[in-house]
Image (cartoon, rainbow, N blue to C red):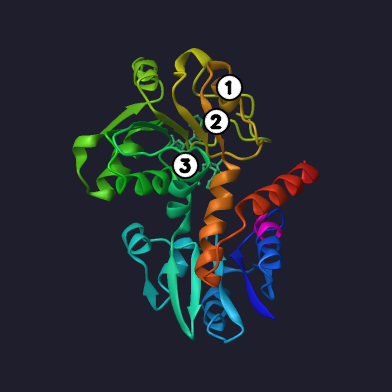
């Protein structure tokens, strides 16, 4: 039986074992995906154990994505550029790091929403870790413009400075800027990468855009996946826009990881269905 699992600090609610084990079973691969909770001082030793021949690799989640980046032998191009990994593949004892948060996000847009980013105008709400992954993915997709609106505008400016890329396609603004409505109405893709709308927070009933600020011919992707239908997505439905639930981002980072570990096509719909069922039963 092959081993694979997820490194993190607090993982009791992680959905990854649920949908990865369904995929292994469906593809008839003798592997078990486990939860590997550990403290920072245990990480290096545990990463080194991934070199064993019965181990496929691992996922890495908060707060170890940057730490683990420095512990692998090789890095794929995207991981190298962003400086963080969420996937480790064991290639006969050589560990290679990948960032499927980025590749999976773009893949989910293309495969689930049939959205091709090339030439499109994108509005991203937020400038934290999730926004970084989304923007980084879009950088390679030849988009027409990306506007980053954040509560703390200086954080958005700093993030774009860190990227050090072609600035012409980028704008930053405050989420309180009165021009937000106009930018939003001109967008083909709106991404919420803030924690606004997240259940069990003081912002759980809130949304940064009302229905009249959302155009009909647009895709609205809420990276928040708890709840599955956030206040923003409800407004997007009222506006007649297409919605993308944050659960897809979670699933597709796992889809890309699965395919890197196994070389087989992941059963995306089966993974999504199992994650939905488990999520529903937990809430
Ligand atoms: P983060 O790095 O802490 O960033 C949080 C972002 O939310 C910042 O832009 C912050 O603005 C903004 N924000 C927080 N409270 C706000 C408020 N009251 N009003 C307006 N903006 C507010 O967090 P993250 O890692 O990017 O995660 C963001 C969300 O994405 C979380 O809900 C997380 O669960 C979700 N997520 C989902 C996936 C997935 O697979 N679907 C993956 C990663 C994360 P400031 O800069 O002004 O503080």
Q: Distance from label 3 to label 1 (Cα)?
A: 17 Å
SS at badge 2: strand
**Residue 113 colored in magenta in the image:** no
The residue depicted at 64 percent of the width and 29 percent of the height is 204
Q: Position of residue 214 (x, y in %)?
A: 46, 19
Q: Distance from label 1 to label 2 (Cα)?
A: 7 Å
Q: Cβ–Cβ below 8 Å for labels 1 and 2?
A: yes
Q: Position of residue 276 (x, y in %)?
A: 71, 45
SS at badge 3: helix
Q: Is residue 82 above or below residue 108?
A: below
* Quarter of the figure with residue 280: top right
Q: Earlier in the sequence, mark 3 or mark 2?
A: 3
Query: Residue 40 versus residue 113: which sits nearer the camera?
Result: 113
Q: How many labels, in total?
A: 3
Residue stretch in magenta: 15-19
Q: Position of residue 174 (x, y in %)?
A: 36, 26
Q: Position of residue 39 (x, y in %)?
A: 60, 68
Residue at the limit of the structure toward the right, as seen here: 281
**Residue at image mark 1:** 237
Q: Is residue 40 above or below residue 204?
A: below
Query: Residue 88 versus residue 159: which sits nearer the camera?
Result: 88
Q: Is residue 270 left or right of residue 81?
A: right
**Residue at image mark 3:** 109
Q: Earlier in the sequence, mark 1 or mark 2?
A: 1
* Quarter of the figure with residue 187: top left
Q: Earlier in the sequence, mark 3 or mark 1?
A: 3
**Residue 18 colored in magenta in the image:** yes
């Amino acid at each position: 039986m092959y081993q694979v699992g997820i490194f993190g600090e607090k993982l009791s609610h992680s959905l990854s074992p649920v949908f990865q084990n369904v995929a292994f079973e469906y593809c008839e691969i003798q592997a078990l995906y486990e939860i590997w909770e550990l403290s920072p001082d245990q990480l290096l030793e545990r990463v080194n154990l991934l070199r064993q021949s019965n181990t496929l690799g691992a996922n890495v989640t908060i707060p170890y994505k940057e730490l683990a980046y420095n512990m692998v032998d090789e890095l794929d191009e995207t991981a190298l550029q962003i400086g963080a990994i969420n996937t480790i593949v064991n290639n006969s004892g050589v560990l290679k790091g990948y960032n499927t948060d980025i590749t999976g996000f773009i893949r989910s847009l293309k495969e689930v929403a049939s959205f091709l980013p090339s030439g499109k105008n994108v509005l991203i709400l937020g400038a934290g870790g999730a926004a970084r992954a989304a923007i980084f993915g879009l950088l390679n997709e030849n988009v027409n413009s990306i506007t980053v609106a954040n509560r703390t505008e200086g954080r958005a400016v700093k993030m774009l400075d860190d990227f050090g890329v072609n600035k012409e396609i980028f704008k930053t603004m405050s989420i309180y800027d009165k021009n937000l409505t106009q930018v939003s109405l001109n967008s083909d893709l709106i991404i919420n990468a803030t924690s606004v709308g997240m259940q069990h927070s003081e912002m759980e009933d809130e949304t940064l855009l009302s229905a009249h600020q959302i155009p009909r011919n647009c895709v609205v992707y809420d990276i928040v996946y708890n709840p599955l239908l956030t206040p923003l997505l409800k407004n997007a439905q009222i506006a007649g826009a297409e919605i993308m639930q944050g659960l897809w981002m979670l699933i597709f980072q796992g889809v890309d990881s699965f395919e890197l570990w196994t070389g087989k096509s992941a059963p995306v719909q089966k993974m999504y269905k199992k994650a939905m069922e488990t999520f529903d039963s937990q809430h």
